[in-house]
């Protein structure tokens, strides 16, 4: 039989199949991708001859080298991108201003030991801060998942005169304490029930961008300001399950302030004795010599709840040595010395200090416990109950005033009675006869096992806000401050939550 001639299309396709990365064909012409020229393919010899030419081999080598370099450049750029993001995250989390990267000594140190090019401050600020912020928000969404949540809002005035409100959210879980996150920070034009209710909605729309899950919000925490109470009522209309409770720790602080009002003599003593040793090295040396193991007299701090009572306890424990030191000073040196000497000689001072310590020592310890993390709701309620019982033991006029103050504070707290009932249910101390909002089901109540009843977390976020907005960073826009604050706060909180999950 005569030999059948192979069609041109089939023959060309055979060459392409044998050298896939080198040749291509349209069915009539064989084209070399390496040399970028058509190849004579009438015989196999001519094709092999083209492949064996030095020009083709050199072109092939150049193409392979270019491909490797391109791949390495891509990997290098990707690694550099990760490095820039990591260094941006690290500086913000440690509250180190990004402009510190412009310091020649710091740049030289980092480049020496990381073997990397250190990015410019403007590069990080323009390209990576927003990225770190978005990743932080995504981490919050991922951590909260399908859990029920509580939300806490508080407002402060910063050094620029802005009304700054922070929003903290946390999970409500049966088997572990709450995971807490700073979700949002916003500068409000004014503070009233309407702006707080709107802020509540805006914050939750950040958490759930595809639609707010109204039935997942079970608890709203705030202070006892009238506009907060009113906002809680407004929020209840759109979030049927939410229980609004004002901070119980702050309520106890208001009781402590009432104790302070009842003892103006002790209040004046605490204030004046502190002034005696303020910026007075010679008097401080005298104090150290006469009482080497005793701390200098304390000054109550308005933003730290219960510190006035702790100062009163200090004077009760150390009155004799303080009196001895004060009386050795020259009354003509300052007005504060003269006032302190007159006050400390009063015979009623000692009895009043003893009365305060013996009857009200439980208040600072209760506040401290409520400000801490990871306690059970039932533990908090037991602590409050013990405080109420202890205050009732004081039968005199002042004791009656203080006890009435605590009763009023708890009665005006809109959600305290509900949380107290929930605590009893969780501890099995109550039968079927109880009053709770109809919208709360059994699963919702079970989630309240670790529910907080204080706003300490949002107060802590304001402390971090002050650390971000220092005197040399006043030119930052509020949007930038918000991003830095949320990255920094949640890095600390996330690491705490992560560590606890392995405890």
Image (cartoon, helix red, strand yellow):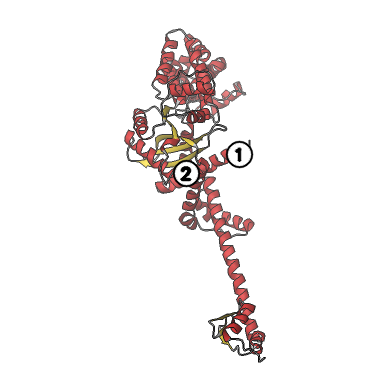
Give percent across and percent down for residue 61.
64, 78
Residue at 55%, 85% in the rendered image: 29
Q: Is residue 426 visible?
A: yes
Q: Quadrant of residue 318?
A: top right
- Tell me the SS state at disc 2: helix
Front one among 459 and 281:
459
Nearest to viewer (mark 2 / mark 1):
1
Q: Position of residue 142 (x, y in %)?
A: 51, 44
Q: Which residue is mark 2?
A: 485
First in residue order: circle 2 vs circle 1: 2
Measure the C-alpha gap from mark 2 to mark 1.
21 Å
Residue at x 57%, y 33% (from the top left corner): 176
Q: Secondary structure at mark 1?
A: helix
- Give the position of the N terminus as an image quadrant: bottom right
125 and 20: which one is in front?
A: 20
Q: Residue at x 52, y 42 (%)?
A: 143
Looking at this view, name the residue that lies furthest to the front.
1
Other-residue count near label 2 (Cα within 10 Å), few / some / many at <14 / 14–19 / ≥20: many
* Residue wearing tag 1: 499
Residue 329 seen in the figure: no
Image vertical order of residue 143 relative to residue 16, above or below: above
Left or right: 206 in relation to 284: left
Q: Residues within 10 Å of mark 1 (few under 14, many from 20)?
A: few
Seen from the viewer's position, the closer of residues 357 and 18 is 18
Look at the numbered discs 2 and 1 and tell me whether their residues touch, using CB distance below 8 Å: no
- Judging depth in this view, the residue of 70 and 104 nearest the camera is 70
Residue 37, position in %: x, y?
56, 85
User: x, y (%) of residue 371?
Assistant: 51, 28
């Amino acid at each position: 039989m005569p030999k059948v001639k192979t069609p041109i299309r089939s023959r060309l396709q055979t060459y392409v199949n044998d050298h896939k990365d080198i040749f291509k064909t349209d069915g009539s012409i064989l084209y070399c991708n390496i040399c970028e020229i058509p190849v004579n393919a009438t015989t196999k010899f001519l094709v092999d001859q083209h492949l064996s030419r030095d020009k083709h081999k050199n072109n092939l080598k150049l193409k392979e080298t270019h491909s490797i370099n391109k791949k390495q450049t891509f990997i290098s750029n990707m690694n550099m991108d990760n490095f820039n993001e990591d260094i941006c995250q690290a500086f913000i989390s440690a509250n180190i201003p990004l402009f510190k990267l412009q310091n020649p000594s710091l740049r030289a140190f980092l480049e020496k030991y990381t073997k990397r090019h250190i990015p410019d401050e403007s590069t990080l600020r323009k390209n990576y801060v927003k990225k770190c912020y978005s990743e932080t928000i995504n981490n919050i969404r991922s951590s909260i998942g399908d859990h029920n949540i509580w939300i806490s809002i508080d407002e402060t005035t910063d050094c620029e005169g802005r009304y700054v409100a922070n929003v903290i959210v946390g999970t409500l879980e049966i088997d572990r304490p709450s995971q807490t996150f700073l979700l949002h920070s916003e500068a409000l034009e004014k503070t009233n029930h309407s702006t707080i209710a709107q802020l509540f909605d805006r914050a939750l729309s950040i958490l759930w961008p595809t639609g707010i899950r109204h039935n997942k919000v079970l608890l709203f925490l705030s202070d006892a300001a009238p506009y907060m109470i009113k906002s809680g009522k407004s929020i209840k209309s759109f979030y049927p399950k939410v229980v609004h409770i004002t901070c119980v720790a702050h309520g106890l602080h208001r009781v402590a302030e009432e104790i302070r009002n009842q003892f103006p003599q002790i209040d004046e003593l605490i204030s004046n004795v502190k002034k005696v040793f303020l910026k007075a090295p010679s008097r401080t040396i005298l104090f150290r010599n006469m009482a080497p193991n005793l701390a200098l007299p304390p000054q109550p701090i308005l933003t730290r709840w219960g510190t006035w009572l702790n100062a009163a306890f200090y004077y009760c424990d150390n009155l004799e040595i303080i009196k001895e030191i004060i009386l050795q000073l020259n009354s003509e040196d300052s007005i504060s010395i003269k006032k302190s000497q007159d006050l400390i000689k009063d015979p009623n001072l000692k009895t009043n200090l003893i009365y305060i310590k013996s009857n009200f020592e439980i208040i600072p310890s209760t506040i401290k416990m409520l400000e801490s993390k990871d306690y059970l709701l039932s533990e908090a309620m037991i602590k409050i109950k013990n405080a109420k019982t202890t205050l009732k033991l004081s039968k005199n006029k002042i004791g009656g005033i203080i006890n009435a103050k605590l009763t009023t504070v708890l009665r005006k707290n809109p959600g305290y009675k509900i949380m107290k009932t929930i605590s009893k249910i969780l501890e099995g101390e109550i039968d079927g006869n109880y009053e709770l909002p109809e919208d709360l089901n059994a699963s919702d109540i079970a989630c309240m096992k670790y529910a907080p009843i204080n706003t300490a977390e949002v107060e802590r976020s304001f402390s971090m806000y002050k650390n971000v907005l220092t005197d040399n960073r006043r030119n930052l826009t509020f949007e930038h401050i918000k991003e830095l604050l949320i990255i920094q706060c949640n890095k600390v909180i996330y690491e705490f939550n992560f560590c606890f999950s392995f405890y």
